[in-house]
Amino acid sequence: MVDISRRNALILGGVGIGGVAIGGTGFVVNQESRRHAALEAAPGVALVQPDELRSSAGILTVSLESSPQQVSIAGRDVRALSYNGGVPGPTLRVRAGDTLSVSLRNGLADPSNLHVHGLHVSPENNSDNMFVTVAAGDSFDYQYELPANHPPGVYWYHPHHHGFVADQVFGGLYGAIIVEDPDPIPASRERVLVISDITLDSAGTIPAATAMEKMSGREGDFVLVNGQVTPRMNARPGERERWRIVNACVSRYLRLRLDGQQMSLLGIDSGRFEAAHEVSEVVLAPGNRADLLVTATAGTSVLRAHTYDRGSSGGMMMGGGTSASADDVALATFIVTGDDVAPVAATPVQPVPRDLRTATVTARRELIFAMGMGGNMGGGMAGNTSNDMGGGMMSATINGQVFDATRIDTTAQFGSVEEWLLTNTSPLDHPMHLHVWPMQIVEQSGRRVDTIMWQDVVNIPARSTVRVRIAFDDFSGRTVYHCHILDHEDSGMMGIITAN
Ligand code: C2O
Ligand code: CU
Ligand code: CU
């Protein structure tokens, strides 16, 4: 059994709004053709798939424009941020070996850029380069060359300009990327579920996060699936659906359950198990993705995000609260009716994943994730807002330092395997993310991991440790690792790595 579930979660008090069953209307651009959708406001509007753009003959060329847009959510007009007018942006479907060209136009009032989260591509030049700034009104042409052996699975894109990431993602800037399987996995249908959260004030604007929210990591009052509030999905008994789930929330962990249905996990992030695992729940830290098979059983089930205790910042500042949402949140309804369908063909066995546990390790490092008040604030709260809390300021550090774009924190040897001990001394979980090279989790809280687990976001529970191994293969260059609670990343919990 893969230990991706966090058990014995404590339920702490909190302010999250749980199970809000507001009539879902979708979260779509208020174009005239779609406007009537806002008036229906009946519970259980069908889940809408984001637009899909698919490569052909090895190439996918996409124009993406980020801009503020009027969208409709829960029957309200909302001023959000959007790629190409939708929330989420279009789903990009590519294959290993493809070239993905994205022309990004930044229609925001702030600097931005683009990151293809989890893709194993070059971090240099106009590929997945974190040091590109696209100023307001400017454009930039990205080109990503996927290697011929790129792992299939679920990836995503979002802005990554330090200091603006949490606001831009919370505002609505995210979309899914699917790398197709070389041999198709039989399924009755496939759905993309991009899960995000958002807070709206009565004027339909997204309020700025408070210093307290930035410290804990903001969680939105509404949890959306493809921009919709509690949409409906329909299936027939015996159908097997493939769900591509993205946790695009800035800070919210998703402990997903679909009681009454059979769930089987193909993999997390770019990691793919040899055989799909039966699971009763899937925990996704911010940034994680799940590739999930759901076999339908007659009846109505609710996809829920159950409470997840990611710790409390209460000890760190006066009035600091818990970061656990108080209640379960209903995300979607899955309605299974009609005649049974013939059983779907078995899922083919997947290739044996690479295992670095027997590899020769050439360097060992420790990365210490810490939070505190004051001290060591050299540019830490780079950003556009004041984080002053009555004289106290938050620091979110890795090895005692906040992000500095001019400093290289880690130099790895290209082609080598390293072992990193990730230590979290703080009372909050930190989901650690490394670009370009995935991490194999070999130890959690001092216990060896028996299965082969590859992820690109690895949760480090509060006051705990995780040990990972990384192969710096295929691409050299400079990129970043950071906490994927994007408020922490914007606060400076990020470092720069080069592999040469
Ligand atoms: Cu999902 Cu560095 O990002
Ligand atoms: Cu990333
Ligand atoms: Cu963090």
Image: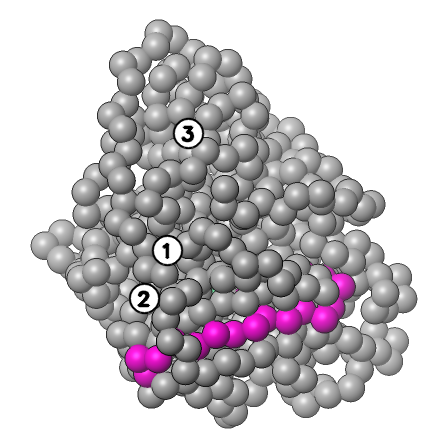
Mark 2 is surrounded, within 10 Å at the Cα level, by few (under 14), some (14 to 19) or many (20 or more) other residues, namely: many
Q: Earlier in the sequence, mark 1 or mark 2?
A: 2
- At x 29%, y 51%, the residue is 352
User: Residue 295, image x and y in percent?
Assistant: 40, 24
Q: Which residue is mark 1?
A: 270
Q: Which residue is mark 3?
A: 294
* Residue bearing mark 2: 120
| Element type where label 2 sits in the image | loop
| Image location (x, y in percent) of residue 196 | 54, 48
Residue 86: in sight, yes or no? no
Cα separation, mark 1 vs mark 2, equals 9 Å
| Residue sitting nearer the eye, 10 or 397 | 10
The residue type indicated by label 1 comes to: Ser
> What residue span does the magenta drawing correspond to?
414-432
In this view, 224 is above or below 391:
above
The quadrant where residue 208 appears:
bottom right
